[in-house]
Image (cartoon, rainbow, N blue to C red):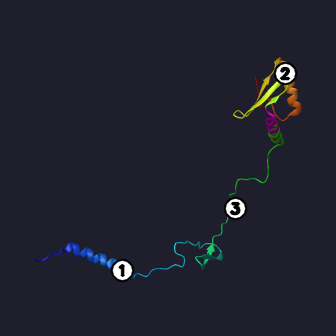
Amino acid sequence: MKPEIKLYYIIPAIFLVILVVVVLLLPKNKSETPGVVIPTQGPLPTRVQLDNKTVPSRAPTLIPHPKIGTGASDEQNISKEETDLATQKRELRKKTPLTQSSFTMTFDFSTDQFIVVLNAPKNTNQTVFNEWLKKNYPGIPLDRFSFK
């Protein structure tokens, strides 16, 4: 009994042995810092301490594009009317709910308006409210108030 050696087993086995020998015999490129990528761009050479070894590296230099900025402006172009409105609205909002003899006021954040409930008689108290507003908060226009 003679075992038959099949040719289609021998050829791949020989190929596999040759491939393993070639891979093992190829010289490896040994780096001092395996797995660490050191940037190589930039004008200033520096030294990096890795695993108790000092290796030279070059830190990249970031140069901002001259036409692209952050969008911030050094100049504040906010008018005095807008500043006064914001300041007076904030101060009045801090005082709400506000109860006076002729009206009651709250602030509705969803509509960004002051809700004013006028006591009876409404026409007289509307005039009292308008005078109070003009005296205390002249920067806030009447369209910021909702009357009930």
Which region shows up in magenta? 89-96
Name which of mark 1 and mark 2 comes first in the sequence.
Answer: 1
Tell me where residue 82 appears, x and y as whole percent: 80, 40
Tell me where residue 55 appears, x and y as whole percent: 60, 79
Mark 3 or mark 1, whichever is nearer to me: 1
What is the number of the mark on residue 22?
Answer: 1
Q: Quadrant of the C terminus?
A: top right
Q: Is residue 29 left or right of residue 42?
A: left
Q: Amino acid at mark 3?
A: Pro
Q: Residues within 10 Å of mark 1 (few under 14, many from 20)?
A: few
Name which of mark 3 and mark 2 comes first in the sequence.
Answer: 3
Q: Secondary structure at mark 1?
A: helix
Name which of mark 3 and mark 1 comes first in the sequence.
Answer: 1
From the viewer's side, name the closer residue of 47 and 67. Answer: 47
From the viewer's side, name the closer residue of 33 and 142. Answer: 33
Disc 3 designates what residue? 66
Q: Quadrant of the N terminus?
A: bottom left
From the viewer's side, name the closer residue of 133 and 33. Answer: 33
What is the number of the mark on residue 125?
Answer: 2
Q: Does 37 appear above or below 123?
A: below
Q: Is residue 145 left or right of residue 38?
A: right
Q: Amino acid at mark 2?
A: Asn
Extreme-left residue of the structure = 1
Tell me where residue 74 appears, x and y as whole percent: 78, 54
Extreme-top residue of the structure = 121
Q: Amino acid at mark 1?
A: Val
Q: Secondary structure at mark 3?
A: loop
Estimate the spatial distance between the alpha carbons at disc 1 and disc 2, rounded to whole Å.
100 Å
**Do callouts 3 and 2 mark residues in contact (Cβ within 8 Å)?**
no
